[in-house]
Amino acid sequence: MGNADLRSLAAIADVSFDDVSGVVAVDAHNWLYRYLTTTVKFTSDRVYTTAGGDEVANLVGIVQGLPKFFEHGLTPVFVFDGGVTELKDAEVSERRARREKAEERRQAAEERGDAVEAARLEARTQRLTSVIHETSRGLLDRLDVPIVEAPAEGEAQCAYMNRVGDVDYSGSEDYDTLLFGGPYTLRQLTSSGDPELMDLNATLDEHDITYEQLVDIGMLCGTDFNEGVPGIGPKTALKEVKEHGDLFGVLDARDAHIDFADRIRELFFDPPTTDDYDVDTDLSPDVDAARAYVTDEWEVPAGEVDRGFDRIEEALTQTGLDDWT
C-alpha cells in the first residue's frame, strides 16, 4: 500500500487532534483494512461471524473507529476504491500471494496448537469481501456518513478532493497520497494516540524539489505500479533526480528502465477521479437504526459495539448536535 520509503523524505509532524478540524476524505479500503486486521487479531471470530458464516468484523471496526472523528470535530467522508488499473496487476497478485502464504502458515500454527501465532497470521489473510463492502456502506449510510465511489484508486480521489479544496485532509496510511498531489494527509487515524500530519508543500520546500520530481523519486524507489530501480533508495533517488533533473535523466545516466514509465508518471499527475460527490457536513445519523443493523441484522453481540455507539452519541451531544439521534 504505497511507498513506505517516502517516509524518510516526507515532512511529517506529530499533531494533536486539537490542532485539526474540518472534513477528512478517508481512504476507506486502507482504513477498513487496518481496523479489520486489528479486530481479527484480538477478537474471537465468534464475535463477528453470523450464523450463516458471514464475517463482519468490519462492523465492529467501524463502530470502534468512527467516534474518534466525531469526538475531535472531524467530519469523515469515506472514499471507496473503484476498478483497479491494469498497471497495478502485479501488486494485486503479490498481495494475493502473501495472503495465501500467510494462510498456509496459519494452518500450520493451528495444527501445532500455537493460537497466538495463528491469530496473528489470520489478520494477514483478511480481504475486503463483498459482504464487507455491502455492510460497511449499509452502516455508514445509517450514520449519514458521506460515501464517495472513486473510479479507480481511493487515495487518488482523496488527494484530488483535498487538492481542489472540497475537504481539508486526506486520511490514509498510504504515502502515495503525496504522489497523487494531496496537500495534507492525516495518518495514524486508526491508532490510539494523536495523528500525524503529512504536508506536501513542506516536503517539496524541505528538499528544494518540484512535485513532478517527487513523483520521479517515488517511482525510482518503487510504487504500487512499478518496481523500483535496484540499488536506489530515497536518499539516492533524491540526489540523482536533483542532479539529472527528472526520472528519465536518472534512467539514462544509469542505463536503467522502468516499464510503462510514461503511463505511470501520468497516472500520478492525472489519475482517474470524479466530481460526482456531495460533501455534506450537516449529518443526521440514525444511531438506533445503526445499532439494529449491526446487532439484529448482522448478529454482532451488542456488548461488542455498545461502547462505540455510546461514544458516538456522547460526541454528538457534546458538540450541541444531540438532535442528530
Image: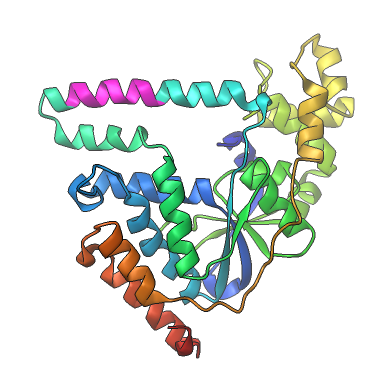
Residue 91 lies in what quarter of the image?
top right
Residue 111: x and y in percent read 13, 23
Indicate whether 8 appears above or below 89: below
Give the residue furthest to the top: 255
Residue 240: x and y in percent read 80, 25
**Near-viewer residue (142 or 272):** 142
Indicate whether 184 appears above or below 93: below
Residue 263 lies in what quarter of the image?
top right
Residue 63 lies in what quarter of the image?
bottom left
Which scheme is used to colour this image of the protein? rainbow
Q: Reply yes or no: does residue 101 show up in magenta.
A: yes
Task: Specify whether residue 190 is in view.
Answer: no
**Near-viewer residue (79 or 130):** 130
Q: Which residues are magenta?
A: 99-109
Q: Reply yes or no: does residue 124 show up in magenta.
A: no
At 54% from the left edge and 26% from the top edge, which residue is drawn? 92
Residue 13: x and y in percent read 61, 58
Residue 301 horizontal side relative to residue 253, left or right? left
Residue 161: x and y in percent read 72, 57
Residue 150 horizontal side relative to residue 203, left or right? left
Task: Decide whether the magenta segment is chiefly helix, strand or loop.
Answer: helix
Indicate whether 244 appears above or below 323: above
At 24% from the left edge and 47% from the top edge, which residue is drawn? 49
At 49% from the left edge and 55% from the top edge, which residue is drawn? 188
